Structure formats: C-alpha cells, structure tokens
Amino acid sequence: MVTLQVFKLVLILGCFNSIADGLGVNWGTLASHPLPPKTVVQVLKDNGIKKVKLFDADSGPMGGLAGSNLEVMVAIPNNMLGMMTDYATAKKWVNKNVTSYNFNGGVNIKYVAVGNEPFLSSYNGSFLNVTLPALENIQKALNEAGVGSSIKATVPLNAEVYSGDLPSAGQFRTDISDLMTNIVTFLNQSGAPFVVNIYPFLSLYDNAGFPFDYAFFDNSGTTVNDNGIVYTNVFDANFDTLVSALKTVNLGGMEIIVGEVGWPTDGDINAKVAYAQRFYTGLMKKLASNTGTPLRPNQYIEVYLFGLIDEDAKSVAPGNFERHWGILKYDGQPKFNMDLTGQGRSVTLVPAKGVQYQPKTWCLLNPKVQNLTAIGDNIDYACTYADCTSLGYGSTCNGLDSSGNASYAFNAYFQVQSQIDGSCDFQGLATETTQDPSTTGCNFTIQIVLDSFGLQVTVPVQVVLLQVLVSVFLVMVW
C-alpha cells in the first residue's frame, strides 16, 4: 500500500516534471568572466531545466550543449540578417551551425531564431526589409538539409509589434501590419510558433503611472475589465493582446511561445531581489496551474526565463538593469528563493559547482591620498571598462559616499582585469587590501578565474591535460 508520504512525493515530482518540460531559459554570454559552457549546462540539468535559448550559435555554448539532450534554440544576430537574404549564405550558415551538430551525441536543436526583436522602434526600420527574406531562406535551407520537419525557423519579437487599448482590441502595429501578416502567415505554413518577449518590468519602467501591483501575479492591485473579462496582471493582458492581433489575420489559434520573461535584480529602483522573487513565485505558480490566459484558458504556456546568469558586459543603453536579469549571479550562485515546481516552497536553485575565484583581494581608494582632484576622471575611466551599474539611483550600492563610490569603481575595474599588476593604481589614488569592503546591501565583487582561453577554471590544469592526452591517445588508437 502506498504511504501518504510517498504519495505526496509522487505529486511533487509530477508537478516538477510537468513544469520543467515546458520551461526554458535564455543563456546570454556577454560577460567579462563567463562561466565555462559545461558548467552552465550542468546547472541547467541540475535544476531540471530542459530548454535553452541562445543569442547566436557560438561554438563554446554549442560544444557545451553537445550530448546534453537539452532542447536548443540557436540564433542569427540582427547584424547578420542582411547576409541571410542571399540563399547561398543562408545555406552555409545552416550547414555550419545546425546540420553539423545533427548527429548522435550532438546538439538537440529545435528552433533557429532569425534575429532578435528586429522591429523595435529604436532600430529605425533597419531590419524591416531583410527579416522576412532571411526567415524564408533559413527555413528553406533547413528543409533542403532534411531537418525542416523537426527544426523550425522563427523570429523572436518584442511585444511592441502589437498594441490595443484592451486585449480584445489587439492588432499589429500600423507601420508593420502588412509585414507582420506575411511573417505570421509564413510561420503558420511552416509549422513554426510565434515567439514573443513579454516584460512586465518594462511596462513599469517605461510608464511612471503604471500600477505597480499589476506587474505581478498575486492579484493584489489594479484589474482591467475587458467586456466582462477581468485581467489581474499585465502578462495575461499582453499575451491576449497578441492572441487578438493574430485573430485579425485569421490565425487566432497559432502556437505562441514566450521567448523572454523575467525581472532584474539591480540597476533601477524597481529592480530588486524581493520584487524578482515575487514575480517568479507568481509566474511559477501560474505555469504549474495550467490556467493559461482568459483567451486561452487551461493551456500551459511555454516560456523561456530571461535570463540565466547576470552579464556584466551587456549594453546599458536600455537601462542599467540590463546587466542584472539573471536568476543566478555572475558566478552561477542563486540570488533568491525560487521553486520551479510552482509550489512556492522556500528553496533555492542548485548553484554552479566547482567555481574558482580570484584571490580575496580588493582595490579601494587609498585613504592616505590628500589630493583628490583626479578622482572623477579615474572613476569615469574605471566605469567605462567595468560594470558600475550598482551605483546608480535606486540600486544596491547607491547609498555609498563619494569615497565608497570610488572604491567600488576601482575594484570593479581591478576584478575585470583579473587583478593583474598595475590595475589597482589609478594615478596613485588606489590601494589593494585583503579586508572585504562589502556592506549588507552592497557587494564588492571578487571575480572568477579565467584560463588562458578566457574560460573560468573549474578543475585542476593537470586533470585537463590528462583528459587531452587520453583523447589524443584514443584518436591515435582509433
């Protein structure tokens, strides 16, 4: 007879598997000290995450994913879309980045993302004429390579491509209406999903009057009544606005995947760990309940969380928060409690293992220095080449005094430079210390160790050399 405890365990595991099967993450690599691909892949596997979305097809992450059986979405960056309008070039790209990994023990590629949010207004129409031809050529190349039935080309789009005063009034943006109709028609014909990026945080960031609680899932604030349908959060309303827009082109039942959704933890007054935890707790509960949205009730929504790891080298043009989207810190350690089963348990993600750090040495403003006339220029220099976004208004280190700001900037540069000799000087203003200057809310980072190839070291060099020698020996014997 099954005991009550075993029955509960079966229910928990069943819930976890059902969520994990549809849950993916975005793996960005714009970091000064990236974790090695195999370490990142192990983190994904340890946490039961089975899908990953990339922003290119770089050989590092692709090599790390080989043999993992994780479902992968590779990508063609926007600056390559024009090249893909030439079919021969598109075919070469597919051969190099897709079919070359299509073997037993290779990479389980399911989608090719043709660009990333190419129709943002901030791009001033740069990609309007090349995205659809590129999409068509990539799918044609996949078909000719014999993998088109299992690997689909799509275009991840920002929610900016549609709008509506209410979800039921959703329609594609006027200036790209015809283009969007052609794209979704092609996607539907090829069997590809519509991939959309939805960011409740950005709704809050871009609109000072946006109701704060409406960005979350716990139904504690504003609601929107759309002809009797009540929306309690902006995610559902945004998703259903897209459903309505698709209905206007007679594709209301088209598959939708949320390619990016998340909440940053620093770099803005609303980018806080507590808010991120609140957001993800609600999102996970929503996914676990399979409630869907009012226009697509009782349906599981496939999502890719954005993102997996903080990226200290990302552009901050959209905002300082851009470097803090990770559900894990730069070193693969959890930031906050997060239960992927959607049960709201007080648990954390499994951290990256075997991470090695630089020596516990920090670079600070030398308290003995009297002449500080050059301090401003040196802070600017440090923050040009290192991440100082935590010093901004509303951020975790915003409360430091002028000396603390200088120390934070100097240390950020020192760590990005891997503590090399001469990187803690700043015209004699700085000095090294072994005393951790971090405060309760503000962390002075110690970076992870890089090897000669720019990857973080997680195993002794002797082990790596032994593995190489064994591999060479096996190749020679073979």
Image (cartoon, rainbow, N blue to C red):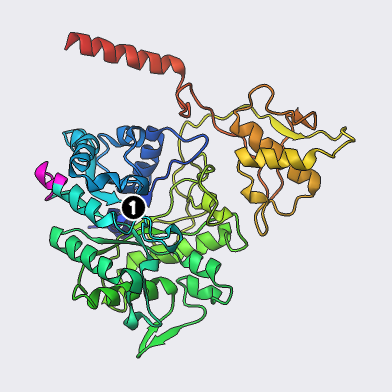
Work out which quarter of the rendered image holds the N terminus and state it. Answer: bottom left
Vertically, is 352 above or below 418? Answer: below
Please report the bounds of the magenta region as a residue range. 141-149
Nearest to the observer: residue 237 or residue 460: 237
The answer to whether 376 appears left or right of 157 in the picture is right
Tell me the quarter of the picture where residue 288 sits.
Answer: bottom left
Residue 447 position within the rendered picture, expressed as x and y whole percent measured from the top left: 58, 34
Q: Is 28 situated left or right of 248 in this image?
A: right
Q: Is residue 146 magenta?
A: yes
The residue that appears at 11% across and 50% down in the rendered structure is: 149
* Image-quadrant location for residue 127: bottom left
Is residue 396 among the parts visible in the rendering? yes
Q: Which residue type does callout 1 highlight?
A: Gly
Q: Nearer the viewer, residue 145 or 277?
A: 145
Residue at disc 1, secondary structure:
strand
Task: Residue at 33%, 51% (x, y): give it.
Answer: 115
For the C terminus, the image quarter is top left
Magenta segment includes 370: no
Nearer to me, 371 or 456: 371
Residue 51 in the image, given as x and y percentages of width and height: 30, 49
> In this view of the protein, can residue 437 be seen by the observer?
no
Residue 316, given in percent of the width and then of the height, sits at: 55, 51
Figure check: 227 above or below 152: below
Question: Badge 1 is on which residue?
Answer: 24
